[in-house]
Amino acid sequence: MARPTRHKRRHKKQPQPATVEVTAEIEALGSAGDGVASANGRAVHVPYVLPGETVRLSVCGSKADLLEVLTPAPARISPVCAHFGPAGDQCGGCSLQHLSTDTYTDWKKETVMRALAHVGLEKIDVLAPLLSPLRSRRRASFSVQETGGDILCGFLQGRSHRLIDLQECHILSPALMAGREEIITILEPVFRERPGLRLSAHVTEASNGLDVELTGDLQEEDLSLHEREQIPLLLEATSITRLTINGAPFWQGEQPVVIFAGTRVPLPPRAFLQATKAGEATLQKLVGVGIGGARKVADLFAGCGTFTFAAVQGATVHAVESDEAAINAINQARRLSGQAVTTRARDLFRQPLMPAELNRFDAVVLDPPRAGAEAQAQQLAESNVPVVVSVSCNPKTFARDAATLMAGGYRLSEVQPVDQFMFSPHIEVVGIFTRE
């Protein structure tokens, strides 16, 4: 039997919208920090602008590029970094360097207020954000590529895959900036054998050096004998303490460690860590105020123990976290310090602590990822826990979970934003919930 003829469906190529130049007024700042304007009958998002400005734009569909600011807003200031804005390399790392400090902090505060109002919590007092200092960011993910015969390690241009030649950064710590050059040095043998290779380098500044994981089109087993011999020799002359390749251990000079409230904790590869030391200290202080004199504390979504070891100074702490490597790190630190900490590896999204388990604690600390703690908040709302301290990097999911807790009888009077992500639209928030 002859097979039926199959005809490939030919998709008609859609014509690209024409690029036009328009003059428009910026109406507001969007959630990503871009300005919102109306052009050609539709909303467009424009980077590097401020509300109230009259600007000249190059518009293609819903995308708009800034050509000129015709009438600048009073809140416009000169950016601190030469890479920022249409006149620079348009580094994709920052979006808000052109705002005055007051306008910047007001916008971040309003971001939190809008999230709360969306779930009916517009009466909650939102305090002024607490800012981390410049050049303090201790975690970053760099792109590593060969461009024009040179290896570059830095950030991509906004809305592009082009890697800029990063000459300065006012966000990263000096150790991370210096680490970029060290990464280039150790990868020279790798790129020499693999032109066109593209990698990402995920770098964390630990207390005793840099922890680096490479991801991308390179496996540890792909390295030649010569590379395996040469790269460790190069690593020994750097501040890098450990190198991991796509999850596989490659080299370790010493175990990277972090120090939480005086306790040394071994850092697993690519483990979560608060973005800045100053931000971490601020969050620990706020959590300490929240739990007060609680004697029994549950630290949920505990990570490697950022709040576990801060809280244990005056209490016994039960740390719960789904990542077993993080739990193992807490256990190692606990055994060495002899502190009153117990642990459990448990997926709190699928298996939250139930009211009967929660009721033995005087206070609970929540520090979930961006998705929030919806299931756990529902169980807390049914518990008798006197105090819940919620730390969140997402105002929207914080607000959702806050509404759940308050519907269960908790009281929230104010929210404290903490900005560890300067010049970006991200903001952290802390709320202290108490039983009525």
Image (cartoon, helix red, strand yellow):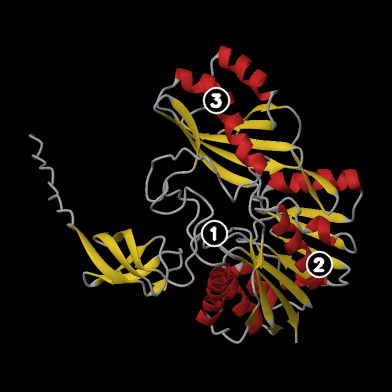
- Whether tag 2 and tag 1 are in contact, CB under 8 A, the answer is no
- Mark closer to the chain start, 3 or 2: 3
Q: Which residue is mark 2?
A: 288
* 270 relative position to 334: left or right: left
| Rendering coords of residue 351 (x, y %) | 65, 61
Res 385 seen here: no
- The residue under the point 70% across, 55% down is 321
Q: Which residue is mark 3?
A: 187
- Whether tag 3 and tag 2 are in contact, CB under 8 A, the answer is no
- Mark closer to the chain start, 3 or 1: 3
Q: Amino acid at mark 1?
A: Phe
| Quarter-of-image position of residue 46 | bottom left
Q: Dot 2, crowdedness within 10 Å: few (<14), some or many (≥20)?
A: many
Q: Which residue is mark 1?
A: 423
Q: Nearer the viewer, residue 66 or 159?
A: 66
Q: Is residue 279 above or below residue 210?
A: below
